[in-house]
């Protein structure tokens, strides 16, 4: 029986339906027709690629940062998923973060297409076109890595998941299905990446390669992508939320995998972005990196979202032409995390707040540079690159235009909780925002999915947890030199001119500094939501967030902290729930309740 496109679309939903999908062909395009022509096959490859979900503003045009302690969204009192999340109005039948996209169905559909491609492209009865062998092998490697990446995205959200490494037969016997363990899932992800990396490296514009050709953006799956997937998967598998007692994904094993990934990327020309912008265009390499388009001059980005972020529109300041809402106002907790420029934390990281509402900061007695009456002076450069704060410049080329978030200011915090155009926290998002951008022209930056700084930090975490901050770790990569966890973090800090972390810290002292470093370096890049969960510190971080209500006029201001309680810090929020309708189907088919704890 010839298989048609219609069957492809139906079978993609196999995991979310027990229905018999064995249908007769109806004259639609067959697999033989697809894999018998170059253009149609390439279109199928692009279908597999299309499930590289663009991170950013996907939750009713809010970022994932709005659903963790990075931000308080201005839509907190408007009916919708933000309000439902903050109030704890969530269930397995209506989970706010799955309203726009059911990630379970979404990524398994992508996995289905990948499996189908990998099956058809090597079937001589189906694939009759004489493809360029280098390009064909490159496609196979790329789709194999994509399948691993989609499994990783599911594991991050749902924990243990069924491994889907082949196309389900129609009809499929669901009674034998099970949720594989985290170790089994991670094994599969890493093995898939290694399988792809065994493909000979290509030096042409096609094939599985390292380089990016002139004019090509960082939206091509290259060998570095496979190493980044390995790094993140190993780190997650070793983390407290996912580690299985007695399992092989120890911190030491994760450190080995993360070091290999970092070393391979460094050996093939990757480096932290260090381009100094013109004074009118950016504050430094860090902010310029996030507001510019990548290209051959960018050696940090491993892979980025294919769509430009729209901070100007969905996280804009009220003085930005065309903005529709203020969106995610950076939290006071995030602002407090930025050290002063001498490299000293502002708060005592072991207990940053003395009260549950975070209205009483526990200031670090060792910090002599922080001024409570001028709190935004002398801070880590990444603060200025990431946050619009009271009195800062809006357009770097025009010092007369400033953002005033004080009460009554042009971007002032408002008592009108029904308005979504003004910040709730006293801050606006600057990261990714090109100040020249508005509805009349310009462009914000792209959200990185993987970048080299993450690989440094992944290694630093695994190495420090395994050996402490000052033990050098090597990998098997030719030319690999030993690196300590502290050296990895200091490399990231050096890019922005922050002082190195000192030697001699205990493992716990370094853990506090490392986690803080990861928080500020990767702010608003869709890491923090998962980090606080895999570290199992959600009850400490997400019971509330706070902001700063500023009164007065320049230069005399008074600062009052304000708090926003939430109902999303219990253990059940560690993982997404499966849709209850799917749980019911699998309970009937397997006799096992697949639902995650608490849902």
Image (tube, rainbow, N blue to C red):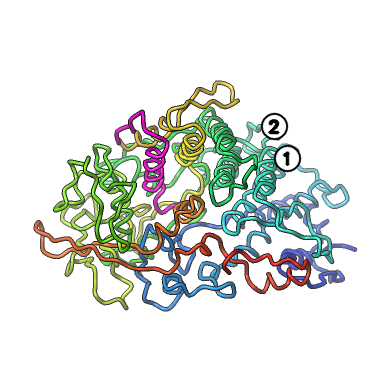
Residue 599 visible in this rendered orientation of the protein: yes
Query: Disc 1 on helix, strand or loop?
Result: helix
Res. 222 visible in picture: no
Residue most extreme to the right: 1
The answer to which image quadrant residue 24 occupies is: bottom right
Circle 1 crowding by C-alpha within 10 Å: few under 14, some 14–19, many from 20: many
N-terminal of the two: label 2 or label 1? 1
Report the residue at 34% width, 40% height from top.
285
Query: Which label number is shown at residue 137?
Result: 1
Q: Which residues are magenta?
A: 498-525
**Percent position (x, y) of residue 342?**
24, 37
Spot occupied by residue 357 in the image (x, y as percentages of width and height) = 30, 64
Could you say which quadrant of the image residue 578 lies in?
A: bottom right
Residue at (21% x, 53% y) in the render:
393
Residue 499: within the magenta? yes
Q: Is residue 338 above or below residue 593?
A: above
Residue projecting furthest to the top: 479
Q: Quadrant of the N terminus?
A: bottom right
Q: Position of residue 39 (x, y in %)?
A: 71, 52
Q: Is residue 78 magenta?
A: no
Residue 134 x/y as whole percent? 72, 37
Point 49% across, 24% down: residue: 482
In which quadrant of the rendered image does the C terminus lie?
A: bottom right
Residue count near mark 2 (Cα–Cα under 10 Å), binned few <14, some 14–19, many ≥20: some
- Taking the image as shown, residue 419 lies to the left or right of residue 595, namely left
Q: State whether residue 397 is above or below residue 157.
A: above
As measured in the structure, the alpha-carbon distance from the residue carrying label 2 to the one carrying label 1 is 9 Å
- Say the numbered circle drawn on residue 13: none
Q: Report the residue marked by disc 2.
A: 200
Between 363 and 396, the one lying in front of the other is 363
Pointers 2 and 1 in contact (CB under 8 A)? yes
Between residues 266 and 15, which one lies in front from this camera angle?
15
């Amino acid at each position: 029986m010839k298989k048609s496109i219609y069957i492809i679309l139906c079978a993609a939903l196999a995991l979310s339906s027990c229905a018999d999908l064995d249908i007769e062909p109806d004259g639609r395009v067959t697999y033989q027709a697809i894999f018998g022509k170059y253009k149609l096959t390439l279109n199928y490859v692009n279908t597999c690629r299309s499930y590289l979900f663009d991170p950013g503003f996907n939750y009713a045009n809010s970022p994932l940062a709005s659903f963790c302690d990075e931000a308080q969204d201005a839509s907190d009192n408007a009916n919708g998923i933000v309000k439902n999340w903050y109030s704890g109005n969530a269930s397995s039948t209506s989970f706010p973060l799955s309203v726009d996209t059911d990630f379970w169905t979404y990524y398994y559909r992508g996995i289905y297409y990948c499996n189908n491609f990998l099956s058809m492209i090597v079937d001589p009865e189906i694939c009759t076109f004489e493809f360029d062998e280098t390009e064909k092998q490159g496609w196979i490697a790329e789709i194999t890595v994509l399948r691993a990446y989609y499994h990783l995205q599911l594991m991050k959200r749902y924990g243990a998941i069924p491994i889907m490494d082949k196309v389900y037969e129609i009809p499929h016997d669901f009674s034998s299905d099970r949720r594989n363990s985290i170790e089994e899932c991670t094994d599969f992800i890493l093995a898939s990446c290694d399988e792809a990396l065994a493909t000979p490296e290509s030096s042409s514009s096609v094939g599985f390669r390292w380089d990016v050709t002139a004019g090509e953006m960082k939206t091509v799956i290259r060998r570095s992508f496979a190493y980044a997937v390995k790094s993140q998967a190993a780190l997650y598998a070793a983390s407290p939320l996912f580690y299985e007692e007695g399992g092989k994904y120890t911190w030491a094993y994760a450190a080995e995998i993360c070091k290999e990934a970092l070393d391979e990327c460094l050996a093939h020309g990757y480096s932290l972005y260090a381009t100094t912008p013109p004074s009118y265009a950016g504050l430094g390499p860090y902010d310029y990196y996030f507001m510019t388009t990548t290209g051959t001059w960018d050696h940090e980005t491993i892979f980025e979202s294919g769509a430009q972020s729209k901070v100007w529109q969905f996280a804009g300041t009220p003085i930005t032409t065309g903005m529709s809402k203020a969106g995610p106002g950076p939290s006071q907790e995030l602002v407090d995390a930025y050290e002063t420029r001498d490299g000293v934390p502002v708060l005592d990281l072991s207990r940053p707040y003395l009260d549950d509402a975070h209205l009483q900061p526990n200031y670090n007695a060792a910090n002599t540079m922080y001024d409570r009456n001028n709190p935004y002076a002398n801070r880590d450069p990444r603060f200025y690159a990431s946050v619009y704060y009271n009195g800062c410049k809006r357009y770097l080329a025009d010092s007369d235009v400033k953002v005033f978030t004080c009460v009554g200011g042009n971007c002032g915090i408002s008592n009108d909780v029904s308005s979504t155009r003004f910040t709730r926290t006293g801050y606006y998002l600057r990261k990714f925002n090109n100040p020249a951008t508005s509805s009349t022209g310009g462009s914000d930056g792209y959200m990185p999915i993987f970048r080299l700084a993450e690989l440094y930090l992944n290694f630093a975490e695994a190495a420090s947890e395994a050996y402490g901050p000052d033990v050098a770790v090597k990998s098997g990569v030719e030319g690999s030199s030993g690196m300590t966890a502290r050296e990895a973090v200091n490399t990231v800090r050096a890019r922005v001119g922050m002082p190195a972390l000192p030697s001699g810290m205990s493992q716990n002292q370094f853990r506090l500094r490392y986690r803080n470093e990861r928080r500020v370096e990767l702010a608003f890049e869709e890491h923090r939501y998962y980090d606080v969960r895999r570290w199992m510190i959600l009850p400490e971080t997400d019971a509330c967030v706070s902001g700063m209500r500023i009164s007065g006029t320049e230069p005399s201001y008074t600062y009052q902290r304000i708090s926003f309680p939430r109902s999303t810090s219990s253990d059940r929020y560690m993982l997404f729930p499966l849709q209850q309708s799917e749980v019911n189907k699998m309970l009937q088919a397997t006799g096992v309740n697949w639902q995650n704890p608490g849902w």
